[in-house]
Amino acid sequence: MVEIRTEHLFNVTITVDPLQMLGATPYGERRIANVTGGAFEGARLRGTVLPGGGDWLLMRNDGVLQLDVRLTMQTNDDALIYMTYRGVRHGPPEVIERLGRGDPVDPSEYYFRTAPFFETATSKYGWLNRIISVGTGHRLPTGPVYDVFEVL
């Protein structure tokens, strides 16, 4: 069996508007966050997160927050990259309450993982179209922050 190895790809900070609370649906409590911007930086690419993306969140009945995110990144050399990811966040109720209030919470106190995928038409970054990546996250009052790793 091949050991799974990763290499740091970039860290990204995403800013979002206050949540739109749709309320209890048949699947759980639905929330929507509009992406307002952000920035990313790594050894092979860096730039900004463009406004206009979104995060369709579902607080499931089992206490797990399920993420479904779509956004556009623009590199410092003007390439556009579409990034999508699904993920989950969960932890002890008191920790999740602190996050909800906007209190600072050490990321080691809860589980926050994502699986980003990329799509670009730019040949310089075409390698992103062919990789699998994973991310570890933490939540700030202004939005999420992730360290994204390429699975080698």
Image (cartoon, rainbow, N blue to C red):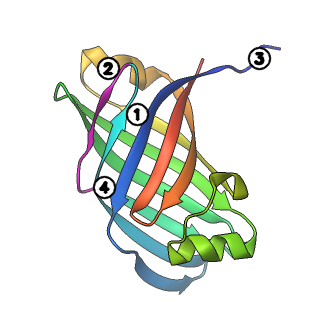
Q: Main secondary structure of the magenta part?
A: loop
Q: Nearer the viewer, residue 32 or 37?
A: 37
- Secondary structure beneath label 4: loop
Image-based side of 99 in relation to 40, left or right = right
What residue is pinned by disc 2?
125
Q: Which segment is the magenta one? A: 44-53
Residue 69 higher or lower than 17, as above or below: above
Name the residue located 75 percent from the left edge and 69 percent from the top edge.
Answer: 92
Q: Which of pointers 2 and 3 lies earlier in the amino acid sequence?
A: 3
Q: Which of pointers 1 and 2 lies earlier in the amino acid sequence?
A: 1
Which of the two marks, 3 or 1, is nearer to us in this view? Answer: 3
The location of residue 82, given as percent across then percent down, is 32, 39
Q: Residue 53 has which mark? A: 4
Image-based side of 63 in relation to 9, left or right = right
Q: CA distance from mark 2 to mark 3?
A: 26 Å
Q: Quadrant of the N terminus?
A: top right
As drawn, the residue found furthest toward the left would be 78
> Identity of the amino acid at label 1?
Phe
52 part of magenta stretch: yes
What residue is pinned by disc 3?
3
What residue is pinned by disc 1?
118
Bin the neighbour count of mark 1 within 10 Å (Cα to Cα): few under 14, some 14-19, many 20 and up: many
The location of residue 71, given as percent across then percent down, is 33, 48
Name the residue located 55 percent from the left edge and 65 percent from the top edge.
Answer: 104
Cβ atoms at labels 4 and 1 below 8 Å apart: no
Q: Which of pointers 4 and 2 lies earlier in the amino acid sequence?
A: 4
Residue 31 higher or lower than 6, as above or below: below
> Identity of the amino acid at label 3?
Glu
